[in-house]
Image (cartoon, helix red, strand yellow):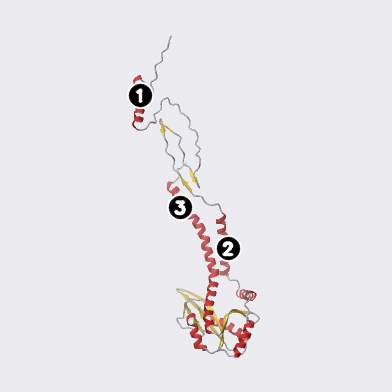
Amino acid sequence: MSSPDPLAAALAPITTLVTDWALWMIPLVLLLVALRSLLLPKLRGILGERRVGAVLERFGTECLHDVIFPDGRGGLTQVDHVVLTGAGLVVVETKNYRGSIFGQEGEAQWTQRLGRQSFRFQNPVRQNYLHTQAVKALVPGVPVLGWVVFTDSARFPKGKPDGVSSLRDLRRDLRDKLGDAPPSAALRAAWERLKGRADQSQEARKAHLDAIRERRGPDRGRRAAWVMLLLSVLSLAVLALRPSSRVTLPVQALPTAVVGGAPAVSVPPTAVVGHLPRQVATAPQPSTPAPLALSSQPNADRVDCNSAIAAVLVDNSAANRGRRDRVCGKPTPEPTSTTP
């Protein structure tokens, strides 16, 4: 049987540690990616709408945020903001985009460019036009204006279409367009009617989302994120419930004492799993008859004694035996006489 590789034995604890680390990190990374895909867009949308809402609260007289209205075609539409101003009602659509934005008011789709990547998205001006028409149907005869706000660090290299602002310029653009006159009594009455038709219940939001899914089909990206989330949670649960791994550390054999040329009882190499064993059982060693055994005395006395014993083995004379007894400290046996 081949002897174990000492390098592999020395690296075994590190290999085990790295393996365990990788087994935990893979599902953790998948979990973070899934949570990012599911939560980050919604979180960014909520934060962006709150930032826009804070600016609109300072500009307009009253505001409605994140409300559901009938769309005038038997369905529902979700509006980010509606503001009461002296020039009429302003319906505001919030977009959380960054990078370079290219698009014109009449185009069906606009382009977002991030570095070398480009993405197409629905023209927000046309999207907000449907919201504007829904509000006009609820308060006919009242001026209703649509506006689009980009909250992130979006740039417009070819210029912004009319009715589009960045968040930092929103208040200034609205003041330049609408002025700061207070709303008339007719506008306030229309505003009260509009507030009566606004719906912020969970039932209305669910019905609106169900209609969007039915019209656009299932969101495959969101579905994939949910599958990734489920798999990562199951993997982490399996890892948490498995038996804890134990690192096996090699223990060197104790040195073997030599007495009389024969090996004494030695402790064989053993593995420590979690802790050292209390007792080490050893097999009994067979006894070998040896009339003469080398002394185990230390240092120079041991050398002289072993030399004297070796001399007796070569020549078992009385002189050698006497020298052995003197050096090794054994009394010389008295000669026995036999009587007839």
Q: As shown in the figure, which amino acid type bears the numbered disc 1?
A: Arg
Q: Are marks 3 and 1 in contact (CB under 8 Å)?
A: no
Residue found at the far right of this picture: 74
* Residues packed near mark 3 inside 10 Å, few (<14), some (14 to 19) or many (20 plus): few
Q: Which residue is mark 2?
A: 230
Q: Which residue is mark 3?
A: 14
* Residues packed near mark 1 inside 10 Å, few (<14), some (14 to 19) or many (20 plus): some
In the depicted structure, whether residue 313 falls above or below residue 107:
above
Check disc 1 and report its element: helix, strand or loop.
helix
- Calculate the distance from the C-alpha at mark 3 to the C-alpha at mark 2: 30 Å
Residue 307: x and y, percent?
A: 34, 27
Q: As shown in the figure, which amino acid type bears the numbered disc 2?
A: Leu
Q: Nearer the viewer, residue 195 or 73?
A: 195
Which callout, 2 or 1, points at the residue further toward the start of the chain?
2
Check disc 3 and report its element: helix, strand or loop.
helix
Which callout, 3 or 2, points at the residue further toward the start of the chain?
3
Marking on residue 326 = 1
Q: As shown in the figure, which amino acid type bears the numbered disc 3?
A: Ile
- Calculate the distance from the C-alpha at mark 2 to the C-alpha at mark 1: 86 Å
- Calculate the distance from the C-alpha at mark 3 to the C-alpha at mark 1: 59 Å
Residue 59: x and y, percent?
A: 52, 84
Check disc 2 and report its element: helix, strand or loop.
helix
Quadrant location of the C terminus? top left
* Residues packed near mark 2 inside 10 Å, few (<14), some (14 to 19) or many (20 plus): some
Q: Are marks 2 and 1 in contact (CB under 8 Å)?
A: no
Q: Nearer the viewer, residue 238 or 158?
A: 238
In the depicted structure, whether residue 220 falls above or below residue 300:
below
